[in-house]
Image (cartoon, rainbow, N blue to C red):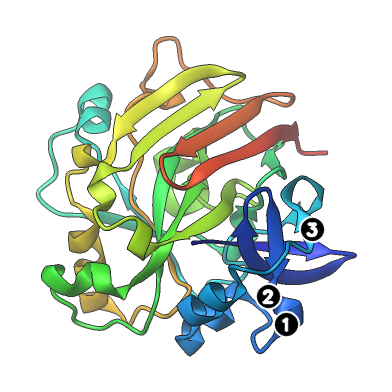
Amino acid sequence: MQFVSYATNGNATWGLVVGDGVVDLGARGPHGSLKAAIAAGDLMDIGSAAQGESPDAALADITYLPTITDPDQIFCAGKNYKDHVEEMGFEMPDHLTLFIKANSTLVPHRGEMIRPKVSECLDFEGEICAVIGRETRHVSEAEALDCIAGYTIMVDGSVRDFQKHSVTAGKNFVATGPLGPVMTTADEIPDPSELHVTTRLNGDVVQDCSANMLIFDIPYIISYLSKITPLQPGDVVATGSPAGSGAGRDPLLWMKGGDKLEVEVSRIGTLAVDIVDET
């Protein structure tokens, strides 16, 4: 199943994707958001019950919202694809590198990703994201996938000149973290290492890689994070980005106003945004 967060007539809701349409589950109750349904533990039951219903709106007509509109935590793995580490000239890491993104970075599918006034170095990084399905603490790698509600897509927008002196700064400019378009439930992706990421900038393929190139795989990441802090339902965990980002190219390739960015992940879909210059 696939679930989507969206707005209709200016009101935030969420629903089940059925063909080219969506069944409005927020209007049917009892939960007003996808995150709330995940936290309640009855997401799959609600989705199964709605599968026979007619869509309330066409996907082409809705206003998408970030898959999880208000995650308690957004964790991101850095330097986590073998090919990306090699292209950047880094040593293969012995430990997982992590950073946190703020909710203010989030942008929906078909939204606008903002290139800030203060920099021309806005880079793209297409990523697979896990959405946590239940409170998770000290979970083993063997059990980690059981704690995932589903998977979605993120662009880890990186302002590289700021990132050089502060990772937190470079990764947290407003409206640089697109998240969407939908969440595919974990039962449909039993082995996330089989997922494939393809990023296109203005129609040109700039990243193309399988998740089996991850240095630290998704079970490891979830287990590691759960040792640090309790993970909460709806938390977003971005797993890293493969080779091909602008910082690894010669000449360097930065996004600019007017560009169009797409990140496609197998079994999930395509996250598409427009790049606009900050005014």
Q: Position of residue 184 (x, y in %)?
A: 46, 58
Q: Is residue 225 visible?
A: no
Provide the residue designation for mark 2.
Answer: 25
Provide the residue designation for mark 3.
Answer: 57
Q: Position of residue 171 (x, y in %)?
A: 49, 49
**Labels 2 and 3 touching (C-beta < 8 A):** no
Q: Residue at x 26, y 73 (%)?
A: 146
Provide the residue designation for mark 1.
Answer: 28
Q: Residue at x 69, y 60 (%)?
A: 22
In screen coordinates, is 84 left or right of 261?
Answer: left
**Labels 2 and 1 touching (C-beta < 8 A):** yes
For the C terminus, the quadrant is top right
| Front-lying residue, 134 or 188 | 188
Q: Secondary structure at mark 2?
A: helix
| Residues packed near mark 1 inside 10 Å, few (<14), some (14 to 19) or many (20 plus) | few
| Front-lying residue, 243 or 278 | 243
Q: Position of residue 273 (x, y in %)?
A: 66, 38
In screen coordinates, is 202 left or right of 209?
Answer: right
Mark earlier in primary sequence (2, 3): 2
| Front-lying residue, 259 or 93 | 259
Q: Is residue 223 visible?
A: yes
